Structure formats: structure tokens, C-alpha cells
Image (cartoon, rainbow, N blue to C red):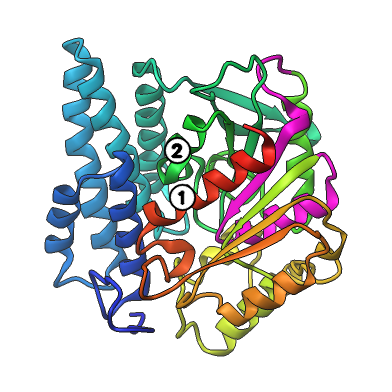
Amino acid sequence: MAKAIGRADWFAYFPEDYRWSAAVSMACSVSYWGGASMGEIDQVGKRLKDKVGDDEAWFDEWTGMGDRVRRLGLAAERKGNRLTAAALLKRACTYYQLGERFRTPKDRKALAAYRKSLDSFARFAGLVDSPKIERVEIPFEGGAALPAWLVHAQNTKKAKPPVVVFFDGLDVTKEIQYMLGVEDLIRRGMSVLIVDAPGNGESIRFRKLYLRYDHEVAGAAALDYLETRDDVNAKRAGVMGISLGGYYAPRNASMEKRFKACVGWGAEPDYHERWKRRIEAAYKSALSVPPHHILWILNAKTVEEALEKLEDFRLDGVVQKMRCPYLLVHGEDDQQVSLEAARALFRLVGSKDKTLRVFRNEEGGAQHCQMDNVPLAVPSICDWLAEKLGA
């Protein structure tokens, strides 16, 4: 069981377990955009209060809530109540993915739950007229493809609005990314391409595309795809990443000059060092996933092999090449990546136009990627991107 870490005044549903509490905090934050219901979160939480650290119970309770909400959504869909069904299926997607995230290796039960999450989101997307959400496949190496959703801009008269490529983190998925403020981005006149890159979401679960350090290969593929479309302006494209995406996005912006702006939602300057310290501490640190998650996404059999594969996951020597505007958003009390590490990364970035936005304890949003109050951070990110991309 993970021990409680950090300040006592941030919301922790399970104070004795950082991982579980961080997941519940994320669920609470996405409720702002309809990705969850506080009442449903509390129902699950109460049933888990005496089972803290039991990931089997976690899986059963969250996917059970997903099943209940999905049944209601499907019934509403059959009756023709499209908006009611859409809202329910949107929440069901979140609950399935919350439950499945701690279950590795991904057995049949895990993959079945994940497929229901994808079907729930696809149904939600098909039931709403606004926003327009389009399923796309991004051509990738070796005949593979990266699964993605293109969410179309609103409140704009531009035939080809700017576009943001939004990459996930270590354990985030494109559907969870949607719940984390994509609707606020599109309202500011930008389309958003949310992508399951190698190591994430569908790409790792169903296509065996494993995590890789040269993430700009995925970024270039996304831009190549966007350049084929006549409804976005690929010449006004930004890149954004959350959590481990704080490594992905800056690397992309540094290596792929077609990106015109970059947001690191959380800093991740040296992922090899991060995991080396976690392993040395016997994983008694702030972890958002079970320790064996890293072996799975790297296709490694041992921690030694995983560390070897993480050797090149460093931004020093890379971000000095960045020239586009850069925004780094970080929490003062981030338990996974210190503010000092974020400041060190920020100093390395070669862009002349760069901004470090630190959310303080007294204002909220001080935890990892502002998961204690995501709706506080999202407007800052959205307004900055709208300005830099000319939305």
C-alpha cells in the first residue's frame, strides 16, 4: 500500500494511498466537464473505504459503476433520448478507464472493460451534434496507425482554424484527455487532435505500440496527417502533453519545427532518473500507477531492462533546440516531479518566448498536473494557446 505523501491540506479521498487518491482527484476534476458525477464517485469511494490498496476491488467497483451507468445510457439511446444517453455514456467511459488503469498485465477482463469504455465514448461522440468529434486513424510506421479523435473548433469563422495536437501521459488516454478540458480549447476557436501515442491507450493495448523516447515520430505523423485535411490549419499547430506528456510535448516542439507553440502540462525533464529513484526507494514514492506498469508499456521483462530502455528519455540536450513559444504549467506541491526540477527544465529551454506558470497551495491546483483542481488550470492553458496560435 502506498503511504500518504505531502501536505495534509490537499484533498485526498484515501489519505493513506497516493495512487488511489490521485485517481479519485482526477475523477472529481473531470466532473466539471461531465466526465463523472460527484455522487457516483462518492458511491464507489464509500464501497472502497475498507479495501484501500486492493486493486481487484478497485477494478470491480469502478467497472461495476461503468456497467450501471452504461446500461442507463443504452436504454436512453434506444428511447431516442440522445442527450441523456450521451451524458451517461460519457461518464461510463471514465469509470471503465479508471477501473482498468491499475490492472496489469491486461487480462481479458481488463481488455473487455477497456473496449466498453471505447464503445461508450464512440457512442457519446455520435450522439452529440456539438461538439463535432471525429474518429481518425493517423498513418504510422510499418503500416500501423495511431488511434485519435479530432474535435472540431467552435466559435470561429475560419474555414481552417488552428489545431492543437494533445498527447497523453504515462497512464492517461485520449478519452481521459478529452474530459480534461478539450471542450474549453475548442470553444476558443481551435481544433484538437487527441492521440493515443505509442505506450498509451489503444496503441499499447490493442496494437502493441510500445513506449519510445523519440516521441517526435508520433508528432510528425500527426502533423503529416493534419496537412492532408482542408478543415484545419496545420501551419498553425501547437503541441501539448500532460504529465509524462511534459516530456513528449517539449521533445516534439524541439525536434519538429512545424509546431508553432508548446505546452508542457507538468514537467518531466529526466524520466530515466525518475524511475531510477523510484526503484531505489522500493516504489515508496508518489506513483500514479502500479510499479509494473512501466515494464508493460516498455515491453521489458525486468526493471534493469526497463531502465536501459529509459536511458534516452532526457530533455537536456534536446530542449535547447526549441524555438517556438513554450508554456510550462506546474504545481508548487507536485509530489511526483518537484518544482525545482520544473524550474531546471524551464531554464534549459531555448525558446525566447517562454512562460512558467506555477499554481500555489493557497490558490489550489498545486498538485501534479493540477489534479486537485484541473478547472482552475485549464483556462490559463487555453488562453495562452489561443493567443500564440492566433485563434
Q: Is residue 121 left or right of residue 66?
A: right
Distance Cα–Cα, label 2 vs label 1: 8 Å
Q: Is residue 254 magenta?
A: yes
Dot 1: element: helix
Q: Which residues are magenta?
A: 229-258
Given the image, on which type of amino acid does mark 1 rest? Val
User: Measured along the vertical axis of the image, is residue 216 above or below residue 232?
Assistant: below
- Give the number of marks: 2
Q: Residues within 10 Å of mark 2 (few under 14, many from 20)?
A: many
Residue 185: x %, y % from top left: 51, 37
- Determine contact: label 2, label 1, CB under 8 Å: yes
Given the image, on which type of amino acid does mark 2 rest? Asp
Residue sitting nearer the eye, 113 or 222 = 222
Q: Is residue 363 magenta?
A: no
Residue found 33% across the figure and 40% down from its top? 33
Q: Is residue 148 left or right of residue 41?
A: right
User: Measured along the vertical axis of the image, is residue 75 above or below residue 166?
Assistant: above
Residue 379: x %, y % from top left: 46, 48
Residue sitting nearer the eye, 171 or 131 = 131
Q: Return the residue at label 2.
A: 184
Residue 2: x %, y % from top left: 36, 80
Residue 221, quarter of the rendered image = top right
Residue 169, quarter of the rendered image = bottom right
Residue 338, quarter of the rendered image = bottom right
Q: Would you say residue 139 is visible in this rendering? A: yes
Residue found 36% across the figure and 22% down from its top? 123
Residue 373: x %, y % from top left: 35, 60
Residue sitting nearer the eye, 240 or 90 = 240
Q: Return the residue at label 1.
A: 378
